[in-house]
Amino acid sequence: MSIIRQPSLFDMHELYELEPTHHFEAVFSTIDLNPFWNLFDKPKKVGAPRELNYGAMVYSLIARMVERIVTIKDLIKRLKRDPVFRYDCGFLHSDQIPSEASYSRMITVISESNVMTHIHDELILLAINEGHISDENIAFVATHFEARDRAQASKKKEKQTPKKRGRKPKVEREQWLKEKQAAENARPIYEKEIVHQLSESVETLYKEAPIEPKWGIKKNSDGKNTFWFGYKGHLAVSTKSQYILTGIMTSGNLNDGKAAIPLLKKIDRDLPALFTAGLFDAGYDYEPIYQQLTNQNLQAVIPYNQRNEREVVGYDEHFAPTCVREHSYRYDSFDQKYKTLKYTRPKECTVCPLRLDSLCQMTFKIRQSTDIRKYTHPARGSKKWNELYKERTAVERVNAYLKEFFGLNNVRHRTGKKARLHFQLVTLVYNASKLAADRIRLEMEQHSLKTA
């Protein structure tokens, strides 16, 4: 039978001081698990009662993440040997400890639903309402982790019939173009160019995201290619409070840039007008991402990624205008009304013999619409741009926490749906732990003010 968990009789601050092993009690208090109960309610009130305590099983999965228990088998051993741990998870003395097969069936049911996303969104709203997430910036990152599944051998490609030489007749060419366009329209949204995501809804982008394990490749810090078979977790993290605002798991071979617009659109729908800038690395330097940031009134802070482009004469590496002697103009301000960047004369102009010559302009004004990739607000190379980009280190710290302390690399399930549940559970427990720590910190501050 299921039981309703009662709040702890101890104050949370006292609980941490008296019994460190019960720190997951603070984590439980931040998560509303009511959506889970609808998945396991009996369709009819008649008949034999359920033998398993599904509520306690869900709490034990969360406790497993908090206590860094590697496998479900180890979790069951802990439940059998530790009566205090068993009671804290919500099991009654009369409840039987579930088997591995029971946990597997429960995980399958949860992975087929959307309750994890709903619970995570409610937790983020709770953190905002309590004042732990305020007006700040968002940093984006993609992190990879390996699958439990075994990599399948790639199928041999069939030999294509050689193309007919020469130009196609007009009728045949028109038919070929129609077939080509129909095949392009029928492709999944994530196989099309990124620009097609701008017109899609959040629900469509999240629903159609590929989640089956695939071979991925990336360059490490030494510039060498590393390969893995598995997935990518794409995260949007608040830079100051370091909460995971939203996330999406995809196949390991998906381009990082194709997950940016789904994350941005979800933030715009659920958390509008709360953030100032979007911080990315150079792998996200695509024009549709700039366009989506502009639509959400967010500043774009993305390093420019040159793609076989020639050097622009009259401009420096940050696309600021240069004078006759190739000194860069200084970024001055941004006109919000006309979306225009203003540059003023370089410092070197004060002693330049050409300062009074008609070749040197006093100021330059460049509209963002000239090229939204090159002319961002704040301007590339400016002090403000560099300060904002430094905040992106927050997302790397969160990435390290997920892998080293919350077991993101420890996928124990096969198939993409169960791996996605693992990813969602890891991010949920991380946010719950962060909220619990913020609550304790705030309580300690209030206590110190009262005693001062």
Image (cartoon, helix red, strand yellow):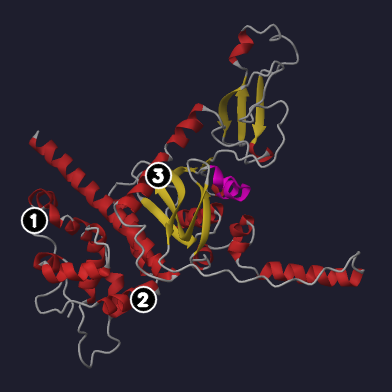
Say above or below: 321 vs 39.
above
Counting residues from the start of the chain, the first of labels 1 and 2 encountered is 1
- The amino acid type of the residue labelled 3 equals Glu
**Is residue 263 visible from the viewing direction of this image?**
yes
- Mark 1 → mark 2, Cα distance in angstroms: 35 Å
- Give the x, y percent position of residue 182: 73, 71
Residue at which label 3 appears: 396
Q: Mark 2 points at which residue?
A: 108
**Disc 3 + disc 2, Cβ < 8 Å:** no
Q: Quadrant of the N terminus?
A: bottom left
Q: Provide the secondary structure element on which disc 2 rests.
A: helix
Closer to the observer: label 1 or label 2?
Answer: 2
Q: Residue sitting at 13 percent across and 65 percent down?
A: 85
Q: Which quarter of the rendered picture does the C terminus lie within?
A: top left
Q: Residue, x 79% and y 70% (percent of image)? A: 178
How many numbered tags mark residues here?
A: 3
237 relative position to 94: left or right: right
Magenta segment: 282-292
Residue type at tag 2: Thr
- Examine the image and state in which quarter residue 359 appears: top right
Which SS type dominates the magenta stretch? Answer: helix
Mark 3 vs mark 2: which is more N-terminal? Answer: 2
Judge whether 373 appears above or below 420 on screen. above
- Find residue 71 and report its horizontal and vertical position in percent: 27, 66
Q: Give the CA distance from mark 3 to mark 2.
A: 31 Å
How crowded pointer 2 is (Cα within 10 Å; few <14, some 14-19, many 20+) is rated as some
| Helix, strand or loop at mark 3 | helix
Q: Where is residue 450 in the image (x, y as percent from the top left)?
A: 10, 38
From the image, tell me which residue sits under label 1: 10
Residue, far bottom: 47
Horizontal and vertical percent for residue 100? 26, 76
Which mark's residue is nearer the viewer, 3 or 1? 3
